[in-house]
Amino acid sequence: MSTYLLPDQNAYFHPTSINDENHIQTEKQESYNNLLATLPKDKGWRSETVFLYKGFWLSSQVVRGLLLIHKHFNPQPTDIFLSAFMKCGTTWLKALMFATANRHRYKFSDHHLLRTGPQSAFPFLDTHIFLDHPITNFDHLPVPRLFATHFAHGLLPTSITSTCKFVYVCRDPKDVLISKWHFMSKLRSKELAPLSFNEAYELFCNGVSEYGPFWDHVLGYWKASQESPDKILFLKYEDMKREPAVELKKLAAFMGMAFTAEEEDQKVVEEIVKLCSFENLSNLEVNKDGGGVQMFTEKVVVENQEFFRKGKVGDWKNYLTEEMKDRIDNITAEKLKNSGLTLGITK
Ligand code: A3P
């Protein structure tokens, strides 16, 4: 069961099963199976197969999650979404957004995040439908409601993208590839042969990886952020590593919760940066072996510790040959040509 904190009440909300949700799922099963049968398929990193849905490779379960979001999610103008391609810094941003929104509630020495870790701080929408808590009922969440998603901008309903704010974080695709291969290899069904690094590399370069192509994902949010900078804050993992306090201040201002001069004097920015640092979060009991788990679906249960690996910029250097690196950099340069965005171009 997933639990989220109700900051105003200092209590946890324990959602109860609602049969409507099962009903929705059963009712839709047939048309959903028919839809999947029509979609192009390729090799999945975690599961056997991914499906090309409206230009993006998705597992069958998140295709279903997306359809249900379209049909049943009711966005509020005050909602703030955290969006990212997998392994670009979702966990870190979750912690930073939660800590920023709730900074008046906790002492930094006895913070909610220290007990739960970032993953449980607010809902991950894509697979929420498979849990005990219906997508139609997020009314218990405090305002602004915070949600996380990996869906591409163009896949989400316009009722969400035209109404809500988005914080998007991206990262050097070379580091994304390494991080994702490690993560998905841990999650990959033991019934399937392991996905070798070379296979993952080929698939990634060809755009075939869950929620990808990576570059189309980034470009979708980048273009939307250029059109509506007040609606989408576009962040880079590398900038956050270099100057976390600067990026955090941008984040807080974008969320409509800018730090006051008094808070800055009291070093609140530094406290949040420290609280949410890789070193701090990865060493919490809840994020260590046997600490806590995230249940994405009945079958996909991920230990919290898997969300923390190295937390560094440039780990790709330990995996990619010069030729492999050049190929990804060339794809990046070609895809982002004339967009005004640069990513991970390194000497
Ligand atoms: P690495 O595998 O390169 O170490 P996501 O949260 O989107 O799944 O991304 C996971 C990546 O972010 C992993 O990268 C993980 O180690 C890193 N990460 C997790 N928490 C972090 C934090 N607080 N600060 C910096 N990096 C973090």
Image (spheres, rainbow, N blue to C red):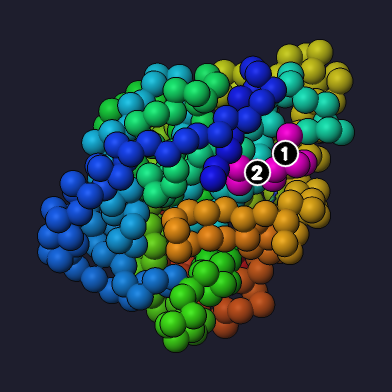
Name the element at disc 1.
helix
Which quarter of the rendering shows the N terminus?
Answer: top right
| The image quadrant in which ligand 1 is located | bottom right
Mark 2 Cβ and ligand 1 under 8 Å apart: yes
- Mark 1 lies on residue: 113
Q: Residues within 10 Å of mark 1 (few under 14, many from 20)?
A: many
Q: Residue at x 64, y 17 (%)?
A: 8
Residue at 74% x, 21% y is 105
* Location of residue 47 by image quarter: bottom left
Against 67, residue 63 (above or below) is below
Residue 50 percent location from the top left of the image: 31, 67
Q: Which residue is mark 2?
A: 118
Q: Is residue 115 visible?
A: yes
Give the residue type at disc 1: Leu
Image coordinates for residue 98, horizontal then vertical, percent = 63, 32
Q: Which residue is more in the foreground, 85 or 300?
A: 300
CA gap, disc 2 and disc 1: 6 Å
Q: Which residue type carries mark 2? A: Pro
Find numbered disc 2 in the image and state the secondary structure of the residue it sits on: helix
Task: From the image, give the main secondary structure of the stretch colored magenta.
Answer: helix
Of mark 2 and mark 1, the one earlier in the sequence is 1
Residue 167 placement (x, y as % from top left): 50, 36
Residue range (magenta)? 112-120
- Asked if one can make out residue 93 in the rendered structure from this viewpoint, the answer is no
Q: Residue at x 33, y 39 (%)?
A: 19
Answer with the quarter of the image where residue 36 lies: bottom left
| Screen quadrant of the C terminus | bottom right
